[in-house]
Amino acid sequence: MKNEIKTLGLVVLLFIGSQNIASQELASNSLQNTQIDRLDTFNVSEEDEKEVNFVLSEGKYTFDNGKKDVLVEFKDGYYTEYYTNDEFVKAKVNWISENEYNLVITEINKKGLPFVEGTTLNTRISRVKGSRYYYKSNLEGLTWSGKFIKVENDFLEK
């Protein structure tokens, strides 16, 4: 009888041990699958990426440069600032997120600016209130803030 009890006890211990190991393996696999599913949510197809809505849509805006309002146009992936006397600055817009972009200067026809063609400027839209878009910009460590105001028509005197 003692041998039967020892054998039964040993069988019960083996059963409990195997159940414990199986449960841990199941929990581990379940956790790995959950983590893989989470990673899959970050896989964005090219079509999904094209559908991102940016805070600033294509169109015309103004900003105050301290002397007068400057007309800005976002069009076909480019940003262009128009000044009086046919002066302008043109840059390629590279969106980082829906509210942040880099401008890479491609053309300059304006004197007295602290940058040259190829310079990159980072801008982050921090707040939108109606037709006003508040931003913070960084140009090689120099930072400033301002606001764009959406406009419908050109207003510059030529």
Image: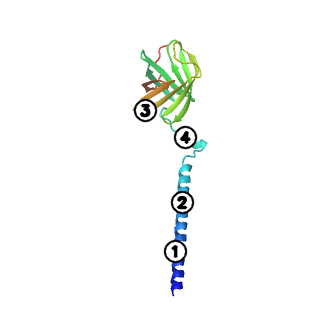
Task: Judge left or right: residue 5 versus residue 145.
Answer: right
The relative height of residue 110 versus residue 11 in the rendered view (above or below) is above
Label whose residue precedes the other's in the sequence (3 or 4): 4
Mark 4 and mark 1: Cα distance apart in space: 59 Å
Give the percent coordinates (x, y) of residue 111: 53, 12
| Label 3 sits on residue | 126
Residue at image x 41%, y 33%? 128
Mark 4 and mark 2: Cα distance apart in space: 37 Å
User: Label 1 is placed on what type of residue?
Assistant: Leu
Which residue is outermost to the bottom?
A: 1
| Label 2 sits on residue | 28
Q: Nearer the viewer, mark 3 or mark 1?
A: 1
Element carrying mark 2 = helix
Q: Nearer the viewer, mark 3 or mark 2?
A: 2
Element carrying mark 4 = loop
Q: Nearer the viewer, mark 4 or mark 2?
A: 2
Cβ atoms under marks 3 and 2 closer than 8 Å: no
| Label 4 sits on residue | 51
Residue at image x 43%, y 16%? 68
Mark 3 and mark 2: Cα distance apart in space: 42 Å
Mark 3 and mark 1: Cα distance apart in space: 62 Å
Q: Nearer the viewer, mark 3 or mark 4?
A: 3
Give the percent coordinates (x, y) of residue 116: 57, 18
Q: Nearer the viewer, residue 143 or 108?
A: 143
Give the percent coordinates (x, y) of residue 51: 55, 40
